[in-house]
Amino acid sequence: MAADLAAQLKRQNDDARERIPAESLTIMDAATARLDASGLAESGVGVGDRAPGFELPDASGATVSLSSLLERGPVVLAFYRGGWCPYCSLELRALQARLPEIAAAGATLVAVSPQTPDNSLSTAERLELEFPVLSDVGNVVARSFGLVFTLPEDLREVYTGFGLDLPAANGDDSFELPIPATYVIAASGEVAWRFADPDYTRRGEPDDVIDALGSLQPAIAS
């Protein structure tokens, strides 16, 4: 049986912390602590709130709207930082592995990042994703969910040192990213479950997503 997502993320983080210089780790940890202290993760759209509507292009350029998805049933909406983030890749692969169960619950899975459509396509192809990967250039939708923050200057330098070119990935020089967050949205448009954490090394478990969808099943059957 495959390890749960938390175990995979911990292994990735442990390996990364062995390779990353101590000075860079200090900057990274301080940035995460400041983001945590800001309360941003708690102030956004939460359980019981109505999910903001959106229309975004998928990796092939077709427009996908939340309203059209909700006409078919519940929606699992995953905000991720980008295909360059190994923790995001682990999460997307874990969700892909549970796609049959998500579909069996009558739900649609979509992922959203600030990457350009071309970079979203690269992510979808590299990870062999069979669900829509949407491009939220400028973080317009992520902002409506209350998830957006600006990468601090010292952390930008660390990321550049890692070879990460966020302006190229996202098509702008704002250095804005979403806090990774996953939502289960009922067909009514109401948020039924949410996971958001300023620590990008932690993600919601697919098991919890499936359980949240299961709690909606009586409503679907009726």
Image: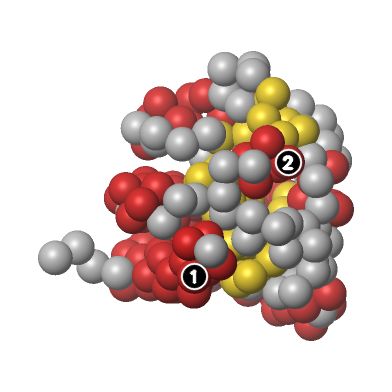
Q: Nearer the viewer, residue 168 or 1?
A: 1
The residue singled out by tag 1 in the image is: 218
Crowdedness near tag 1: few (<14), some (14–19) or many (≥20) residues, C-alpha within 10 Å:
few
| Left or right: 164 as drawn, with respect to 44 | left
Q: Quadrant of residue 192?
A: bottom right
- Rendered residue at 32%/48% (across/down): 100
SS state under label 2: helix
Above/below status of 108 relative to 60: below
Residue situated furthest front in the rendering: 222
The residue singled out by tag 2 in the image is: 67
For badge 2, the amino acid type reads Ser
- Rendered residue at 71%/74% (across/down): 47
How many marks overall?
2
For badge 1, the amino acid type reads Pro
Q: Position of residue 154 (x, y in %)?
A: 76, 58
Q: Position of residue 177 (x, y in %)?
A: 73, 50
- Rendered residue at 14%/65% (across/down): 1
Which numbered marker is on residue 105?
A: none
> Are discs 1 and 2 less than 8 Å apart at CB?
no
Q: Quadrant of residue 155?
A: bottom right
